[in-house]
Image (cartoon, grey):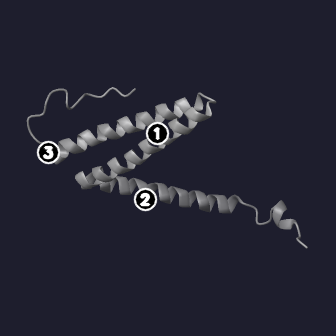
Amino acid sequence: MADFANPFGMNVNRKLTNEELAQAIRMDISGELEAIYLYDAHVQATDNKAAIKVLSDIRDEEKAHVGELMTLLRILDPKEAEFFISGEEEVKELMEELDKETAVNTPSSTIGSLIKED
């Protein structure tokens, strides 16, 4: 399990700044990701259909929470949002390169394309 410092170990006698709240949201995201991992491990470790159905549903709700928290984090820390966007663009470029490489290495005719349909 993730072992992070607790930012709320004592009562906070003031409102958090956006920077402090963003840091707390990052911890919340890590907790949600850990929960997803644990629920998924439980799903994989059983054949009980009721448990699989309930745990899968809970796991998927945690995934939605990650999306909600990531959206909030993008609002609280626009600079960090720029890094997220940059990372997304990098992956898209790599996928385009992969598609081009696959197209180059794919023969123009395949067994399936040689079959004539009547």
Q: Which residue, given by chain and number where applicable, does mark 1 sit on?
A: 58
In the rendered image, the quadrant that contains the N terminus is top left
Identify the residue at image location x=39%, y=50%.
Answer: 67
Discs 1/2, front: 1
What is the distance, in whole Å, between disc 1 and disc 2 at their CAs? 31 Å
Q: Which residue, given by chain and number where applicable, does mark 3 sit on?
A: 17
The answer to whether mark 1 and mark 2 are in CB contact below 8 A is no
Could you tell which of marks 1 and 2 lies nearer the N-terminus? 1
Query: Tag 1: Cα neighbours inside 10 Å, few (<14), some, or many (≥20)?
Result: some
Estimate the x, y position of residue 98 in percent, counting from the top left: 58, 57
Where is residue 28, by image quadrant?
A: top left
Tag 2 secondary structure: helix
Query: Tag 3: Cα neighbours inside 10 Å, few (<14), some, or many (≥20)?
Result: few
Estimate the x, y position of residue 41 in percent, counting from the top left: 53, 31
Question: Of the residues shown, which amino acid type is indicated by label 3?
Answer: Thr
Q: Which residue, given by chain and number where applicable, does mark 2 sit on?
A: 89
